[in-house]
Each structure stands twice: as structure tokens, then as C-alpha cells.
Image (cartoon, rainbow, N blue to C red):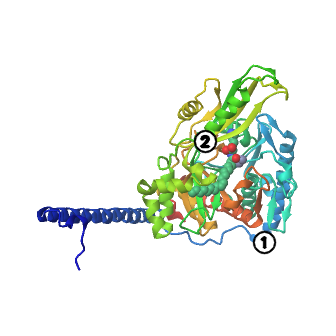
Amino acid sequence: MTVMFPWMRRGIPRRCRCLLHSAVQLLCCAFAVFIFALLFILFFRAILIQHRLDVELGARPEETKDLVDEARSMERAERLAGALKIPTISYKTDQQETQAFHTLHDYLQKSFPIIHSHPAVKREIVNELSLLYTVHGTKSGNIPYLLASHLDVVPVNEKGWAHPPFGGFIANNTYIYGRGAIDDKGGVLGILEALEYLLEQGYRPHRTFFIAFGHDEEVSGKRGAQEIAKLLQQRGIKELDFVLDEGFPVSDELIPGTSRPVAMVGVSEKGTATVELSVTGTPGHSSFPPAESAIGILAAALARLEHNPLPSMFGYGPEKNMFEYIAPHVSSFYKTVYSNLWFFGKMMEYKMESQPITNAFVRTTTAITLFHGGVKENIVPPSATAVVNFRIHPAQTVNEVVDYTRNIIADPRVQLKIKRSRESHPVSPHGPHSVQYQMVSTSIRQIFRQAIVVPAVFIANTDTRWYLNFTTNLYRFLPTMVKLSDVPRYHGNNERISVEHFHQAVNFYYRVMKNADLLILNGHTTRPFAAEL
Ligand SMILES: CCCCCCCC/C=C\CCCCCCCC(=O)N[C@@H](CCCCN)C(=O)O
Ligand SMILES: [Zn+2]
Ligand SMILES: [Zn+2]
């Protein structure tokens, strides 16, 4: 049976029919070759990236038995709960619950007697409320490193909590509830528990390291981490080997294509700009109002901003790297997608934009956080102000974001004032030759055995900004598991950490302290790390 194509009908001369037929055949072949070549390129890239990363990352670290004893994990959880009872709240710069910080200092001193009486450890109070610990190593001549966390917490909305936010409640011996459980007293207590155990075991760290606990991270770090950084500089510390501060937690159910948890290590962090928008009106009697009020004009401008988010920058920043690192660990379909963002970028972008937490990876985010206007119900408002907090994607600058905002608002009656701003941080080394990154990655995989470790851009801000002059190796990571459904607990209601996950946090810091010592050979910081483990 012959198939009759439209161009083979009798009305068309035979010669033309043949020519048309051949042309269509040729086009079909060309299309098939194109599809075949495209598939080949996509798969080839996926295989190439997998091979490159296999070579780079090496084998999963051996399971280590050198860990913190699990038997005392409940005792440690109770110590964390005790710290959560102390309301070290930061409201604004220089507006803090100052007395609570002194109480917390005393509490830490009593809770960790070995650290606070050990001859190798010096504890200092910096600028009245921050803490700096220097742990003197036995081998001199190495570049010290710094572990950071913060003592302050954000305010709470008591009504939304199932258990009092400063009650230090442990539910069913499972979850430790309280403001600061994950942000960031879990980090403070995690580091101290690890060091206490290390010293209790009679281990003396080979290399010197600092533990920096700022007291105002949540409102800038200017009085805390900045002062600690100044003090280190005054003491002649010019260089730190690496800085490890709070960051992304280990998360599962988040990356399509794998059921394994993903540990994103922040190798950079987004920039930020806090912009105040204001409109001035003419006050008057509300019985004969103007057509547009200051509040109405400002509200309309804000609505335009929310309806016109900054364009996606997906694929233009370091996030491309993150997906390439995930690629070797996911199903073939996703392997091909993640290794070829140049081709599948739009599809991924669409998926990422669908949830606030993943949207934050894709673009500069716009958050309207404050609004004030009006003085009385029957007075036309004399003014209205709002504050918009942008978190800037590394592929954009503060100026670009402000220009974009001005263009979208497009109303000269709305005045813009930049209150605070900062460009995104430089990207820290994270390849096979960065022994510091590999050390952090190894420590993560020793504790979170199933985790896929990938570099990422941290979507919020940390105290690392104050240590940028000391090192290029700044890493942001929170050694605990957080599920997608737990993300709203950050700065939200019912913040909590499980006893098991807190134990993992302690273990992670313990491994870092041990592994960081393996970075030195013959008394000097050395490389490569992998060979040392
Ligand atoms: C493929 C994407 C998968 C996404 C998975 C994301 C899971 C991440 C979960 C939580 C991230 C929350 C980040 C919490 C930030 C904590 C640090 C913080 O609060 N910093 C403050 C500093 C304020 C400084 C004064 N301006 C902040 O950034 O506001
Ligand atoms: Zn924090
Ligand atoms: Zn925070």
C-alpha cells in the first residue's frame, strides 16, 4: 500500500511531485539527525559532568566511629533547652534585651565547665555582649580558622506558638521548642558541646581556632561580629584559613529527581538592599478628601512592585554549579536536565518559581516589610512610608535593583531612599582543590551519610560579611535537617530542633574540629585534604 501525501496528488506535475517528495524526505532526515545530535549532546554533557565530578569528589568517606557519645544526647538537649529560655532578643540596632545576654554568658560558663577552665581556651567578652573563644593549638605556625554562630534571636509572636517560645520545652523527649532552636542557639550550643566533649576526651586541638558568637547578627552584626573582627585584626590576625557560619540546613524532599537529602553549602550569599518609599500628602478633613491620598499612592506603587518581580536570573549566577553537583546523584532524566541548564533552564526556572523558598534561588526577591501611614480616622494622611527589603541575586547589583524599582513605580510622587545595602559576596572556592571546602563536605558526609553536598548561594545574610577580609574560604552551613514544611519556622512560630538532629549538629562540629586538624602536616596548613582522611 502506498501512502498518498498531499503533494503527490495528480494535479501536480510528476517532476514537481518527485522533487517535493525528496525535499520533504530530506527535511525529515535533517530533523531526525538534529534530534539525535541534540540528545547525544545532552547525554554526553551529563556523562561528562558526572565523570568530572566523580573524579573531583572522590569516594564517600569511610564511616567513622570517632563521634560524640549518643548516650548523653538528652542531657545535651536539655542544656540547649536551658539556653532557649533566655530571651536574647534583638529588636533593632542598640535595642536589645541586654540583661538576657549577660544571663546567657553565665549560663554557658556554668554549662561547659571544662571549656571555661581549660588552660588552652581563652574566653573574652567583646563589646559587652559578644563572645570570642580562642582555642590554642599545640602546633604553631598554622593559619587559624573560625567557627561562628550568634547569641541573639528575632522577636516572637507568642500567640502563634504551641509551646512558649522562651519556655525551653522538650516535647515527648523528641523536639526542643524555642526561639533560636535553629537560628542560631543550636549552632552556639552545638559548637560548645563538641568542644567540651573533645577536651573531656583529653584531645588537644593541633591548630588554633576561634569561636565567635556575635550578639547582634539579626540586626546587622555591627556591634558584635564587626567588633570581633576588629579585635582579631588588632591582634595581628591577618588571615583565617576558613570561616564556617550558619547557613542552609540539610533538606530533603526539595530537589526533584532524588529522595536523598541535599546539604547545600553557602559559598556566597545574596546581596541586600533596604529601600524606604515615602509619599507626602496634604493633611485635611476626611469629609472632602483628595482623589488620591498618600496612602493610596504608596499602596498602588507597592502593588506594582509586587506584581512585577525582578526578572529571573536563573543560570546567570553560581546556582548553575549547584545543579551540576546534584546531577550525578539523580535519575537519568534529571541528570540530563541538571547537566544542561543551557537547554532546560526555562523549564527549571518555571518549577523553581512556583514556591517562595525555591523562587529565592532564581531572582532578586522583593519583600514589603513595613508600612506606616495616617494619624487619625478623620484626617487625610499627611504622609505614608513603606520599607521594601530586596535580597539581590549575585548576577545583579544594588544599583540595578534600585533603578528597576524606580522604573516600575514610575511615579515621581514616590520618593526612594536606600537605608542599607550590600552587594552579594564573592564566591568562595569549592572545587576539588579547595581543601577547606572538601573538609567541610567530608565532615557533612561523615554525619549525614546519605547527603549530597553541593555548593549554593545562601539566600539570606550572615555575620560572614565581617570576616570577608580575612579569607576567601567562607562557608555557610547549618548542620541540621529541615523539611520543607519546617521552613516557615525560621523567624516564624514554633521554631524547634529535634533531639536527634541536635546530636547530629554536635557531631558535625566535633568532626570539623578533628578534620580541620588533619589539614595540617608537619605543622603547617597543607593540601590535599582527601589524602589525609
Ligand atoms: C533547589 C532549592 C532548594 C531549597 C532548599 C532550601 C531550604 C532552606 C531552608 C531555609 C533557609 C532559611 C534561611 C534562614 C536564614 C537565617 C539567617 C538570618 O536570619 N539572617 C538575617 C540577618 C539579618 C542581618 C540584618 N540585616 C537575615 O538574612 O535577615
Ligand atoms: Zn541566624
Ligand atoms: Zn535569623
SS for dot 1 = helix
The residue lying furthest to the front in this view is 11
Q: Which residue is drawn at 51% across and 62% down?
A: 326
Q: Residue furthest left?
A: 15
Q: Residues within 10 Å of mark 2 (few under 14, many from 20)?
A: few
**For this rendering, which residue is in front, 359 or 248?**
359
Residue mark closest to the camera, 1 vs 2: 2
Q: Where is residue 439 in the image (x, y as percent from the top left)?
A: 56, 59
Q: Which mark is residue 307?
A: 2
**For the residues marked 1 and 2, what is the alpha-carbon distance in whole angstroms?**
53 Å
Q: Residue at x 23, y 80 (%)?
A: 1
Image: 7 above or below 417: below
Compared with 482, 302 (above or below) is: above
Residue indicated by mark 1? 71
Give the left or right position of residue 54, taking residue 475 as reference.
left
Looking at the image, residue 443 sits to the left or right of residue 91; the answer is left
Q: Which of marks 1 and 2 is nearer the N terminus?
A: 1
Q: Residue 51: give x, y in percent of width and height.
A: 41, 65
Q: In this view, does 212 lie to the left or right of 10?
A: right
Residue 206 visible: no
Quadrant assignment, res 195: bottom right
Residue 128 position, x and y percent, is 80, 37
Drawn side of residue 295 relative to residue 308, left or right:
right
Q: Which mark is residue 48?
A: none
Q: Is 296 situated above or below 346?
A: above
The C terminus lies in quadrant: bottom right
- Residue type at tag 2: His
Who's the residue at 70% across and 35% down the image?
222
